Amino acid sequence: MAIEHAILVSLLEQPGSGYELARRFERSIGYFWTATHQQIYRALKRMETDGWVDVREVPQRGRPDKKEYSVADLGRAALTSWLHDPIEPESVRHDLAVKIRGAAFDDPSALIREVDRHRQAHTDRLARYLAGEERDFADRTDGGPYGPAHAERELQHAVLRGGIAYERMMIAWLDDVLATLHRFRPER
């Protein structure tokens, strides 16, 4: 997926400035796609040149005017085309998994601190996802249907639930790895 598609989805959910988009990428879109402020601004410039987004100047008091972006017809057509194109299932490239396998050729217990660090990162991310779910979907944690008029919100929640499930799976796997590594810890 190109960053442009993630930006189009975000702008269809709500038009905004480059800064606002960056904040969304740090928050909700960051559940499944990350981008730096620089990447977002470069992509917006390309998208404006290609006619994918419309831009309007929004006056601000005491500050320079800001540019607010929204999806143009060409952008919507590009997104629709991309949505209908098949994509390859993602392959897993996991540096930590290679390190874990490679630890058999060194001191496996030396990897414990690194695996602990990864486990903490996944635990922290899970906590952020659960807090986001409570904040944004507190009325929907019972799993009941939203109804067809609420597809946007229901699909946002589905992506978040996928992130939550992934983080829980990673934590369980890392717990298993840690238990295995601890078996190779030298006797003191």
Image: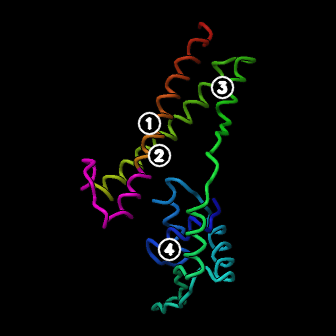
- Residue 8 is labelled as none
Disc 1 marks a residue whose amino acid type is: Arg
Residue at 56% in and 85% down = 54
Residue 132 drawn at (x, y percent)? 37, 54
Residue at 53% in and 81% down = 69
- Residue where numbered disc 1 is placed: 168
The kind of secondary structure element at disc 4 is: helix
Query: Can you tell which of label 4 and label 1 is closer to the viewer?
Result: 4
Q: Which residues are magenta?
A: 139-160
Spatial CA span between label 2 and label 1: 10 Å
Disc 4 marks a residue whose amino acid type is: Leu
- Residue where numbered disc 2 is placed: 125
Spatial CA span between label 3 and label 4: 40 Å
Residue at 63% in and 18% down = 109
- Residue where numbered disc 3 is placed: 100
The single residue placed furthest to the right in the displayed view is 105
Crowd band around label 2 with a 10 angstrom C-alpha radius: few (<14), some (14–19), many (20+): some
- In depth, the one of 123 and 90 nearer the eye is 90
Residue 110 lies, with reference to residue 150, above or below; the image says above
Residue 79 lies, with reference to residue 129, above or below; the image says below
Spatial CA span between label 1 and label 3: 19 Å
Crowd band around label 3 with a 10 angstrom C-alpha radius: few (<14), some (14–19), many (20+): some
Residue at 52% in and 57% down = 30
- Residue 11 is labelled as 4
Mark 4 touching mark 1, by CB under 8 A?
no
| Lateral position of residue 84 relative to residue 15, left or right | right
Find out whether residue 157 is within the magenta segment: yes
Spatial CA span between label 2 and label 4: 25 Å
